[in-house]
Image (spheres, rainbow, N blue to C red):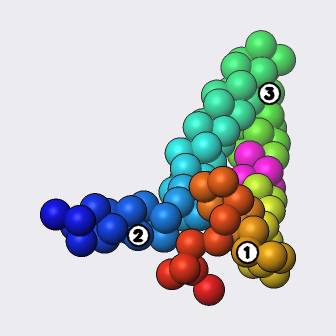
Amino acid sequence: MRKEGKIIQSVSDTSRPLIPLLTWGTQFALTLGILAWLGHWLDQELNTKVLFVLIGIFIGLFGGFYRLFQIINKLQKPVNKGHHPYAKNGKKPDDIN
């Protein structure tokens, strides 16, 4: 029973730094969808064809990939004194390089 608890804890500590990457997809899709919808609404109000939809999509794409770049850079920073940026209590899990 104790060994199972250690395995579960080890998996939890290992997967914790990946949570920002897993949530990025949802954030990206929602941001892109909201900005495209807002652009569509502006296009209807201002009688433009697809100008604001395209602007919203490009802003959403740029912002989403910029956020992904930030997350990846934070995960790749050197670990100082056992501190990992996304680990629980700031401690680096043993299984993460």
Residue 84: % across, % down? 71, 68
Q: Is residue 78 magenta?
A: no
First of labels 1, 2 by sequence position = 2
Q: Amino acid at mark 1?
A: Gly
Please name the residue that numbered disc 2 is placed on. 10
Residue receiving disc 3: 48
Q: Which residue is mark 1?
A: 82
Residue 43, horizontal then vertical, whole percent: 75, 25
For the record, the magenta segment spans 60-65
SS category of the residue bearing label 2:
helix
Q: Could you tell me how far apart the alpha carbons at marks 2 and 3 are, in whole angstroms?
A: 55 Å
Position in image of residue 82 (x %, y %): 73, 74
Q: Secondary structure at mark 3?
A: loop
| Relative horizontal placement of residue 36, taking residue 69 as reference (left or right) | left
Q: Quadrant of residue 12?
A: bottom left
Q: Is residue 62 visible?
A: yes
* Circles 2 and 3: CB atoms closer than 8 Å: no
User: Which of these two is toward me, 72 or 16?
Assistant: 16
Tell which circle, 2 or 3, labels the residue nearer the N-terminal end.
2
